[in-house]
Amino acid sequence: MARPLVLACGALVAELRAVLAANGLTDAVDVRYLPANLHNRPEQIVPSLRVLIGEHIVDDPERPVLLGYADCGTGGHIDALVTEMPQLRRLPGAHCYEFFAGAELFAEFQDDQPGTFYLTDFLAKHFDALVWQGLGLDRHPELRPMYFGNYTRVVLLSQAPDEALIEAGRQAADRLGLVFEHRHVGLTTFADAVTVSLRRAA
């Protein structure tokens, strides 16, 4: 049987590489990444996954595949794909914020202030491209209240203790006119999700 295949969101490149290296798995799996800007087009995630799955399991239809995605705004379509193809597994949770923070901590944030806009290290670093430009706010800043009028704060759930990324998160909150909060969550919960999922996939 071929070694496991990981098909992951491009927003997870640094974190996934770190987890695989720390657990001695870099040479034990094959990894392919999908464009991170699918964050803004979740309806395209499953069709894109289908293309990669078709390309990489053609010689071994039962090859184990880990999807480096949560639900990610697909409305259950990733879960439907997993049900359709039993050799697939996905990471737990509704989105990357949950599998980085863990379900319990994320629920605390949501219960405290449902109107929270979350950032990871990747999204803080690429805020302009993925959020500001991705939503057209560079061309139409007057749309900001429509997109963010119901939000009360920005929370950066950081993976690395990087002051530059924390400052980038703070600047993003300022541009959105929201309060900024930071919680360092590290990679432990994410690493557990990846390694457990890979064991189950294999």
Image (tube, rainbow, N blue to C red):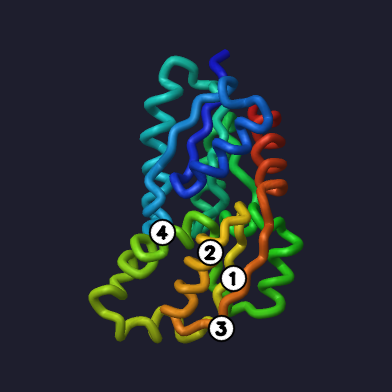
Q: Is residue 25 above or below residue 174?
A: above
Q: Marks 3 and 4, Cα distance to the nearest angstrom?
A: 21 Å
Look at the picture and state if 180 lies above or below 93: below
Q: Which x, y percent locates residue 85?
A: 54, 33
Give how far across and how far down residue 70 sits, in percent.
57, 50
Question: Residue 55's spot in the image, x, y percent?
Answer: 37, 26
Give the mark nearest the N terminus, 3 or 4. Answer: 4
Which of 100 and 62 lies nearest the eye of the viewer?
100
| Residue linked to disc 1 | 155
Mark 1 and mark 2 residues within 8 Å of each other at the beta carbon: yes
Q: In the image, 170: left or right of 111? A: left
Residue type for callout 1: Val
The part of the image, by quadrant, that contains residue 141 is bottom left
Mark 3: secondary structure = loop
Q: Which mark is residue 152?
A: 3
Label 1 residue SS: strand
- Determine the CA span between mark 1 and mark 2: 6 Å
Q: Quadrant of residue 49?
A: top left
Q: Which residue is mark 4?
A: 126
Relative depth, front residue between 89 and 36: 36
Q: Could you classify mark 1 by the number of other residues whose Cα lies within 10 Å: few (under 14), some (14-19), or many (20 or more)?
A: many
What's the amino acid at mark 4? His
Q: Which residue is mark 2?
A: 119
Depth check: give the residue in front, 190 or 68: 190
- Spatial separation of the CA atoms under disc 4 and disc 1: 15 Å
